[in-house]
Image (cartoon, coloured by chain):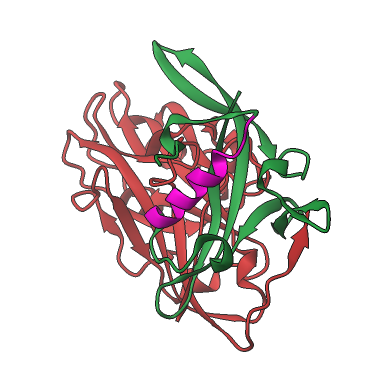
Amino acid sequence: MATLTVYPDPDIETTSVDGETSESGSQTWATIIAAAGDAKTDDEGTGYFVRIRAAVTLNDFTYLGRPIILFDTSALTAGATISAAVLSIYGLSKEDGPGWSPTYNIYSSAPASNTALAAGDFDSLGSTAFCDSALTYASWTAEAYNDFTFNATGIAAVSKTGITKLGARSANYDVAAVAPTWGAGEEATIAAYYADTALTTKDPKLVITYTLAATFVPQITMI
Amino acid sequence: MYTDYKFWFIRRDDDGFITEVAVRFYEGEYATDEGQQVYTRTRRLQTLDDLKHLARIVKGKPILKGVSESNGNMAVYYEPADFGRIKTDDELRVFLNKELAKDTTREPIEEQLWQP
């Protein structure tokens, strides 16, 4: 079957943004996962993918990150039947001093803009997993692509005519609403490359396997 | 002034051969950030005026193949007639680095220099 590999566009975005949103400040786990968000980064080549950090105040947490990644998948066209989709994120680094062993999954996102993130997009991520198996912290690999294979829900979320809007969360802590075992200043972080890198070898990518009922005829315009 | 490209999409057929590619071109500058030279894109290049070095002359007029993103922005469109029968991203990068080198008003970023 044919495949379409799509990439977000870098800052200065014109179509589909990628980056990280976050909430910071000492607060309980229940409060931080329900927060509106207070920061965003959408113009850096590398950054946190999902970061959890404990505060120095007993049982408080001071950082929770949720990345948002958009793809213009309109080149699929309405007649496409999608059989598989894999989101690949190129790992930069990881750290888990307290041994929290977070797991990570992909969810829907709904940022206010397709071309720029806002801090308030932090609370726009869904909670229905797009992969049957969450990626474990142990399996997150630096300097290699980390693959998230979509289930039927994830495949259904791929837009055939517009923008596919994805995000990531810690499945076993953030989505499950279970606080990691607190330790002053402890953190578990995975970091990644985003589309703003100068390279074309480490961008986030979405590989979609599909068939078309009729032969695809590209709409080519002379510019 | 510098220039670089990013992929929008790469389409492959059942056998893994690349059949279509859409590419976004940019203009940017290097700036020093904490002692390191960092490339920052300042403008997307998507008109014939910006990309005339990629155009073909047909009946005396320059033309450039483009494909429209979902919001109307134009990406430059390539097909096997342009890059040949290839399968890998690396082969595609060699072709695109060569395309980037056609720009006489901007310098390709270090990562995308064409190596003859």
User: Any idea which chain is the red one in this picture?
Assistant: A
**Residue stretch rendered in magenta on the structure:** B90-104
Residue that lies at the very extreme toward the right in this rendered image: B60
Look at 50% across and 25% down and name the residue there: B39
Q: Is residue A158 visible?
A: no
User: Which image quadrant is residue A207 in?
Assistant: bottom left
Per the rendering, the colour in which chain B appears is: green
Decide: is A125 above or below A116.
below
Residue lying at 66% horizontally and 47% vertically, measured from the top left: B54
Q: Residue furthest top?
A: B35
Image x and y of residue A211, in percent:
53, 83
Count the labels in the image: 0
Front residue (pair B105, A188): B105
The chief SS type of the magenta part is helix
Q: Nearer the viewer, residue A114 or B6?
A: B6
Q: Is residue B92 magenta?
A: yes
Q: Is residue A119 left or right of residue B51?
A: left
Relative horizontal placement of residue A159, taking residue B51 as reference (left or right): left
Residue B25 percent location from the top left of the image: 61, 42
Residue A95, given in percent of the width and then of the height, sits at 22, 35
The verdict on residue B13 being magenta is no
Q: Quadrant of residue B4?
A: top right
Residue A136 horizontal/vertical position (percent): 24, 54
In the figure, residue A49 lies in which quadrant? top left
Q: With respect to residue A103, does A155 lie above or below?
A: below
Question: Foreground: A52 or A199?
Answer: A199
In what quadrant of the picture does the N terminus of chain A appear? Answer: bottom left
- The residue at the point 38 percent across, 53 percent down is B90
Q: Is residue B104 visible?
A: yes
